[in-house]
Image (cartoon, rainbow, N blue to C red):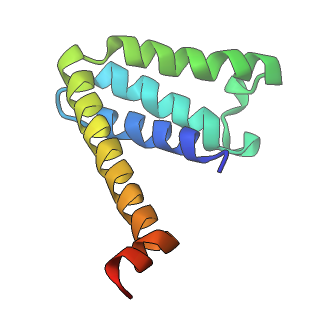
Amino acid sequence: MKWIIPLKAFMRYWRMAQDPRTPGVVRLLVYAGIFFTVAPKKLRPQALRMDVLDEAALVPSLIALAMVLIPSKVKEEYDRVEKKEIKEQKAEGEEQAEAASPGAALASGV
């Protein structure tokens, strides 16, 4: 469960970087942030190897800079889509909870 929020954030950044309206420099920042997050240390270039403290500061800084530089129209669109998905998931969860509750079976006469 603790990986759900970072995974959703990763997917959001990835989708925004794939958007053709996102500038190339911002894409590079997003890809670099993701690379430093998921790549093992042995795959990173020797010149870019850092201490753990440096990495802990670099990765959020890259992602934050990329989020600031992404055009506002792109962010607003993806925020709108994400909010819509959250509402749909909540509605589905509530429907499933109602269907699974013992009171629902009694009320329907089953």
From the top left corner, tell me how far across and down residue 78 is, in percent: 26, 32
Report x, y in % for residue 5: 55, 40
* Quarter of the image with the C terminus in it: bottom left
Residue 66 horizontal side relative to residue 80, left or right = right
Q: Quadrant of the rendered structure where residue 52 is?
A: top right
Q: Quadrant of residue 49?
A: top right
Residue at x-position 72% and y-position 31%: 46
Q: Tell whether 38 sits left or right of 23.
A: right
- Whether residue 51 is visible, yes or no, is no
Task: Give the residue at x 68% y 25%.
Answer: 48
Q: Is residue 23 above or below residue 7?
A: above
Horizontal and vertical percent position of residue 55: 71, 22
Query: Eyeballing the image, is 11 above or below 47?
Result: below
- Along the viewing direction, whichever of 74 and 41 lies nearer the viewer: 74
Instruction: Tell how many labels.
Output: 0
- Viewed as shown, does residue 17 lie left or right of 63? left
| Residue at x 62% of width, y 36% of height | 37
Give the residue at x 45% y 12%: 65
The residue nearer to you, when weighing 67 against 87, is: 87
Q: Is residue 63 visible?
A: yes
Instruction: Please state the horizontal and vertical placement of residue 77, each as a whole percent of the image.
Output: 20, 29
Quadrant in the picture for residue 74: top left
